[in-house]
Image (tube, helix red, strand yellow):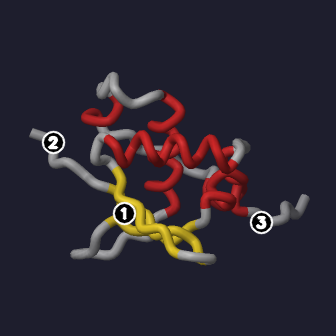
């Protein structure tokens, strides 16, 4: 059977990574942690660069199966505690930069 490749199918393989410093931060909701993990999985990593992605909240909401407003709440929560930096652009997808702490 030949499966059509969709974004959900493309990224659903493999494992997700949630760092311990985020996993055990009780200030962050579980839903926001999952959104952070989805964004991390979407990032194509290059040596020496920030973990950065350009995505619309609509695209993230579609991948998560949530509303755009739910994604906005998750991103506001992550931004409040310094786990993500968002640069909004008029009529363009947002630039999302994830903050990675080094494990002690």
Instruction: Answer with the quarter of the image where residue 64 lies.
Output: top right
Question: CA separation, marks 1 and 3?
Answer: 27 Å
Image coordinates of residue 11 in percent, x first then y, are 61, 57
Residue 71 is left or right of residue 21, and the answer is right
Of label 3 and label 2, which has the lower sequence position? 3
Q: Nearer the viewer, mark 1 or mark 3?
A: 1
Which residue is identified by label 1?
A: 97
Asked if marks 3 and 2 touch (Cβ < 8 Å), the reply is no
Which residue, as the protein is rendered here, is positioned at the far left? 104
Image coordinates of residue 28 in percent, x first then y, are 39, 30
Image coordinates of residue 75 in percent, x first then y, are 47, 48
What number is the disc on residue 103?
A: 2
Residue found 67% across the figure and 50% down from its top: 68
Image coordinates of residue 93 in percent, x first then y, are 57, 72
Q: Quadrant of the C terminus?
A: top left
Is the residue marked by circle 1 packed among few (<14), some (14-19), or many (20+) residues within 10 Å? many
Residue 31 is left or right of residue 99, and the answer is right
Q: Nearer the viewer, mark 3 or mark 2?
A: 2
What number is the disc on residue 76?
A: none
Which residue is identified by label 3?
A: 5
Q: Name the residue nearer the viewer: 102 or 54.
A: 54
Q: Quadrant of the N terminus?
A: bottom right
Residue found 27% across the figure and 74% down from its top: 49
Which residue, as the protein is rendered here, is positioned at the far right? 1
Is the residue marked by circle 3 packed among few (<14), some (14-19), or many (20+) residues within 10 Å? few
Q: Name the residue nearer the viewer: 32 or 2.
A: 32
């Amino acid at each position: 059977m030949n499966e059509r490749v969709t974004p959900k199918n493309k990224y659903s393989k493999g494992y997700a990574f949630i760092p311990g410093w985020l996993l055990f931060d009780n200030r962050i909701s579980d839903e926001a942690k999952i959104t952070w993990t989805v964004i991390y999985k979407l990032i194509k990593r290059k040596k020496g660069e920030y973990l950065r992605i350009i995505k619309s909240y609509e695209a993230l909401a579609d991948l998560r199966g949530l509303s755009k407003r739910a994604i906005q709440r998750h991103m506001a929560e992550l931004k409040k505690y310094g786990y993500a930096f968002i640069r909004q652009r008029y009529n363009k997808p947002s630039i999302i930069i994830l903050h990675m702490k080094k494990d002690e």
